[in-house]
Image: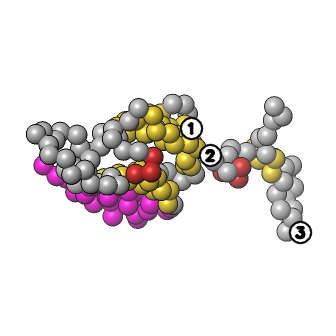
Amino acid sequence: MSSVFDFSPLYRSSIGFDRIFGALETASRLNTAGNWPPYDIVKTSADDYRITMAVAGFSQDELTITQEPNLLIVSGKKAGQDNGHYLHHGIAERVFQRRFELADHVKIVAANLENGMLTVDLKRELPEEMKPRRIKIGSGTTSTRGEAPQIESDKRAA
């Protein structure tokens, strides 16, 4: 059973959330038939994530990891054809492409392939201007000369 959600009422009362609504609409239309290769997504800390994919039989040269704005694409393609005569061929060596929607400011930190497991580490890094900051409260008099309000950053020395 498939459900389609209509987010148009939310557009009337929210500003700047159109990307989130677009991602939700895309997720509701995704075809779940392509479930190979299997993968895990783990939140390792408040701003760190790890994607682990089982890509047995693929080498580093046969895997491609691409980061586009708000999108991570992991794809694999076997380099050569094995012309052996198989009595049973159960190891999947098919071409694949996995797409992961990334939130704003999520970057790839590292990617490793070990024992058939591809691990991609990601980190959310908020720019300084997006972090919480303390606003200085002035006295009862207001400035009419067009001076900019004084804003203090909440930075602390390590």
Numbered mark located on residue 145 in the image: 3
Give coordinates of residue 93: x percent, y percent.
26, 47
Q: Decide if residue 114 is on the left or right side of residue 88.
A: right
Q: Which residue is rendered at x = 41% and y = 32% of the image?
A: 115
Q: Is residue 8 magenta?
A: yes
Give coordinates of residue 19: x percent, y percent.
44, 60
Q: Which residues are magenta?
A: 1-30
> Upstream in the sequence, badge 1 or badge 2?
1
**Which residue is under mark 1?**
47
Q: Which residue is rendered at x = 25% and y = 57% of the image?
A: 29
Closer to the camera in the image, 111 or 59: 59
Closer to the camera in the image, 7 or 101: 101
> Upstream in the sequence, badge 2 or badge 3?
2
Q: Secondary structure at mark 2?
A: loop
**Which residue is under mark 2?**
125
Please name the amino acid that badge 2 sits on.
Glu
Q: Which residue is rendered at x = 56% and y = 38% of the image?
A: 47
C-alpha separation, residue under disc 3 versus residue under disc 1 = 42 Å
Mark yes or no: residue 14 visible.
Answer: no
